[in-house]
Amino acid sequence: MVGIVGKPFTTVENQVEILGRRGVICDAGTPKTLLREGYYAIVNGYKAPFLDAEASRAANEDRYLEGTRFDDIYALFRFDRDLRAIAFRFLMMVESTLRSLISYCFCTAHPGTEDYLKPACFTRASGYLRDGRDFERDLAWMIDTLEKHAHGMVVDTTGSPAPSDVRVQYYRDVHGGVPLWVLFTELTFGNLKYFYALMRRDEQKAVCERVRETCGRMRSLTPQEMIDDLDILVDARNICAHEERLWSARVGASGEAGFSEIVASIKNYLTDDGDLALDEMLAKLAEDYGRQGPALGEVISKLGIWRGGGTRPETTCTSGRRHVDLR
């Protein structure tokens, strides 16, 4: 049997030595930071903007741009953590809005308590805006997921029954059935994305119109635009929840949407007050970190986060969706 070639353990003293040998300026606080946060999380996750590509190729290992400090890399790590916190706050607001509006529009068309368990209440393969070849599988999976939550059949990773949300349990015990707006409290954002994709077209349009109405948008999104947004939003939400890198993330169905597209998708489901609050929090974050060094300032600039003051420049892109140039 071929043995596994493992990565040897490296002490924090060795880690500092490696960084110094590769051109990173460390100080007395570097070892404590590495112990507290982890070398892999900081260096491997946030070194890219500080690397000297030509010198790295020549040495066949990482080499850093002249003058790079460990504090520069750590500042990008902290910036991304704060960026995730802001994005997550507004993603939770968007998720709450969509839970409410999707369940409302579905139940308006299908008022029976558990109509969501009937395949006839959903679209057909020809109307499915995701890959039509997956329609039957996706619909079966969605109804099975809904049924397990509605009837208390969800199990945890050990195979034991998972406790239901107290609201779901109450409706199941007292009323003998769980309405969709209650059941939605147990579903993930990813579940919600597929539920919307499986809705009938007129109900999808109704959700889009309710978003326009309640959030004060200039026009309704199309169902396909909302599905594209949901692909981006669910990916971004998972990145934030699992503390993965957001500043360099590429998300969505195409895997090409960056941070500016994430912000644009979030803004489609915010009120004007929420929109302004998001801009102000991002601008303050950019201002706080942008002065910490030119490399970090360049990263922030590439993200499209505006660091100035005064009125935000705003345009409308060709799709009719609002686009704010935050730079």
Image (cartoon, grey):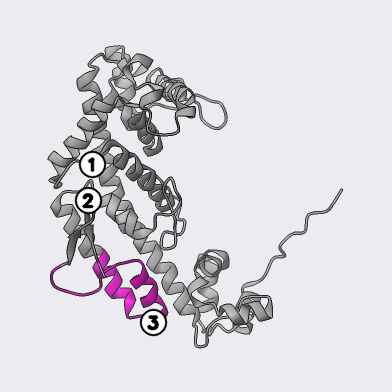
Q: How many marks?
A: 3
Mark 3 or mark 1, whichever is nearer to me: 1
Considering only vertical position in the picture, is 298 above or below 275? below
User: 16 or 223: nearer the eye?
Assistant: 223
Instruction: Choose the circle earlier in sequence order: 3 or 2.
Output: 3
Bounds of the magenta span? 282-311
Magenta segment includes 303: yes
Distance in Å between CA atoms under marks 3 and 1: 39 Å
Q: Which mark is residue 294?
A: 3
Q: Which mark is residue 321?
A: 2
Q: Alpha carbon of mark 1 to alpha carbon of mark 2: how far?
A: 8 Å
Give, as a three-letter code, the residue at label 1. Leu
Position above or below: 232 against 52:
above
Q: Is residue 327 left or right of residue 159?
A: left
The residue at the far top in this view is 176
Circle 3 residues within 10 Å: few <14, some 14–19, many ≥20: few
- Residue 170 seen in this snapshot: yes
Task: Determine which residue is flagged by label 1.
Answer: 221
Query: Foreground residue, 56 or 191?
Result: 56
**Looking at the picture, how far across and down is residue 152, in whole percent?**
42, 20
